[in-house]
Amino acid sequence: MAMPKHTLNINKTSYDVEVAAGTSLLWVLREDLRLTGTIKAHHFWIALDVGMIIQPNNVKAQMEGGIIMDMSSVLKEQITIVDGQIQQSNFHYYSLGYNTRGSRQH
């Protein structure tokens, strides 16, 4: 049975790939296309319904914090297992991302 064909457009370059259903995008990028390096997020778009806003700066801070937590979980979280034992013991192993380059939130 033939695998589905897809075209990925990444940084103005098109890549034609054939991957099995359920294959993660990260696997395709790293293993199939050998694309590695730094991921840069230049813009974020947020849609939310918070009701009546009393403190706009607090809402903005909560949304920015949510973006940082989500990006950290995608890019930095990992669990290392050696001989059936998890190597990380607590949150001091947890590395949060941070916005030093001024990504714009929309």
Image (tube, rainbow, N blue to C red):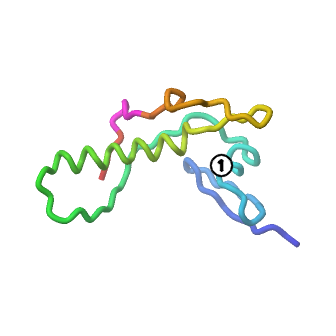
Residue 63, horizontal then vertical, whole percent: 31, 49
Q: Quadrant of residue 69?
A: top left
> Is residue 24 positioned above or below 78 on the image?
below
Q: Residue at x 70, y 43 (%)?
A: 30
Residue located farthest toward the left when viewing the structure as drawn: 54
Prevalent SS, magenta region:
loop
Residue 45, horizontal then vertical, whole percent: 35, 55
The question of residue 101 being in magenta is answered with: yes
The magenta span reads 98-102
Q: Which is nearer the eye, 106 or 72?
A: 72
Q: Which is nearer the eye, 39 or 93?
A: 93
Residue located farthest toward the top when viewing the structure as drawn: 92
Dot 1 amino acid type: Leu
* Count of numbered labels shown in the rendering: 1
Q: Which residue is mark 1?
A: 26
Residue 87, horizontal then vertical, whole percent: 66, 30
Q: Residue at x 55, y 37 (%)?
A: 76
Is 8 left, or right, of 2 in this rendering? left
Characterize the local packing of mark 1: few (<14), some (14-19) or many (20 or more) Cα atoms within 10 angstroms: few
Q: Residue at x 74, y 58 (%)?
A: 17
Q: Which is nearer the eye, 4 or 96?
A: 96
